[in-house]
Amino acid sequence: MSEARRTLPWNSRPVDEALRERAEAFDRLCAPDFAPVRRAALERLAEVGIPTARNEAFTYMNPAPLFRADADSWYGAPLPSPPEETVPAGPICPHAMCVARPDGGNLLEEEILRAERTTDPVELYALCFADRFDWVRIPPRDEAGNPVVARLAARPRPVAEGRLSSSALRLRLDEGSAAVVEILPVENDVDGWSHLSLAVELGPRSRLTLVGAQPPMKRAAVTSSICVEQAEGSLLEFREFRGGSPLARGHVEVHLDGEGARCELRSLSTLRDEAEQHHHVRIFHHAPRCESDQLYRQIVFDGASASVDGSVQVDRGADGTKSNQLIRSLLLGDKASAAGKPQLLIFADDVQCDHGATHGSLDDEELFYLLSRGFAPDRARAALVAGFAQEIVDLFPECGARKIAAQWTRQ
């Protein structure tokens, strides 16, 4: 553990001392098998530090209340026993292999290495107190030699009152395999914090459709960290809907490691009242002729706030890269706020990269057109808002997430 006297943002207690104390209590109570992973995350968090609004990655939100509320729940009190096993991955596909505990392989070593190179402090904090990891491997063919298209469902743990509830899913797709993974919503809305950690490895020419929808939460904070590593010729299709909460943040990190890998990200947020939703997106083009395409749409009603902090990095040698990034925000209220910060970091030649962000209210000409055709004002505005969202909703596969997205964009 680093001896640097980093302090918690809300008091003078050294963060390394406080977190070590809690980690030791965690080791006594549950999942000693994962103690090395928690220690690696703790060491890394001591280097990165507990984030505040001064951190560049948290420009649009103040994360301190998340850590303060969680820390206040365990200062000077023993930790309760962990909840019952309610995390995924419960593969719906019988050909998927699910391993809930390491079986003598190098899975723990992989988790330690992942923790050591993680830069997201929210993810590190959650890993410090993880007591379960679910590993799922999707083979390309079943025993009869038929191609496997796996369907998996992952449900985050229920929110614990006043505490962090962390879920961890690790997914590996073998060469040529395909999977549809639906991240089910957090359901119980209590004062607490739910975090989902998802790490994915896409083998050569594999294909993953990752979809999720989270309805609005009034009390619970909801965060997630998704990291995808793609081999040559692989495809990632990411679809999500977010309804926001008092504090909500999604970190998405994609590494295009193999030539010809492609990723397509589509996200829709519809926020009301005092809800927040913040996206932190990092796309890395490491290999030639890879493609990334991002479209983030935010519908923000009076009093709510949203942001997208996204960057695309093209490394040296990643020639032939194609990248497009667009952030569009629809502001419906004098107090509604939205921010978009697309960035390009290009260190290669022969690339095609575009990025942009737009913020505004409903188009007056479109509104006038509907009014002139006999639409009532409220109905005309609702139709324009629905049209703004429908392009994203139509891209969802048929699943519960699509129904949730359609329901909340119609309201």
Image (spheres, rainbow, N blue to C red):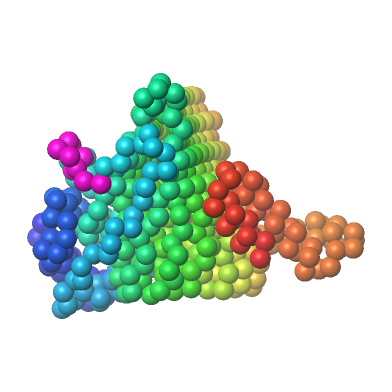
Q: Where is residue 362 in the image (x, y as percent from the top left)?
A: 72, 60
Which residue is pictured at 33% across the width and 70% down the height?
160
Image quarter of residue 301: bottom right
- Position of 16 relative to 320 (above/below): below
Residue placed most toward the observer, 312 or 301: 301
In the image, residue 67 lies at what x, y percent? 29, 69
Q: Judge by depth and name the residue closer to the eye, 281 or 144.
A: 144
- Quadrant of the image occupied by residue 206: top left
Q: Which residue is more in the foreground, 112 or 10? A: 112
Q: In this view, does 164 lie to the left or right of 230?
A: left
- The answer to whether 244 is drawn above or below residue 13 in the figure is above
Which residue corresponds to the image point at 60% horizontal and 64% vertical from the top-left? Answer: 300
Relative to 275, say whether 230 is above or below.
above
Quadrant that contains the C terminus: bottom right
Question: At 61% across and 72% down in the image, what residue appears?
Answer: 302
Q: Which residue lies furthest to the bottom in this view?
A: 76
Q: What stretch is highlighted in magenta?
A: 100-108
Residue 286 visible in the snapshot:
no
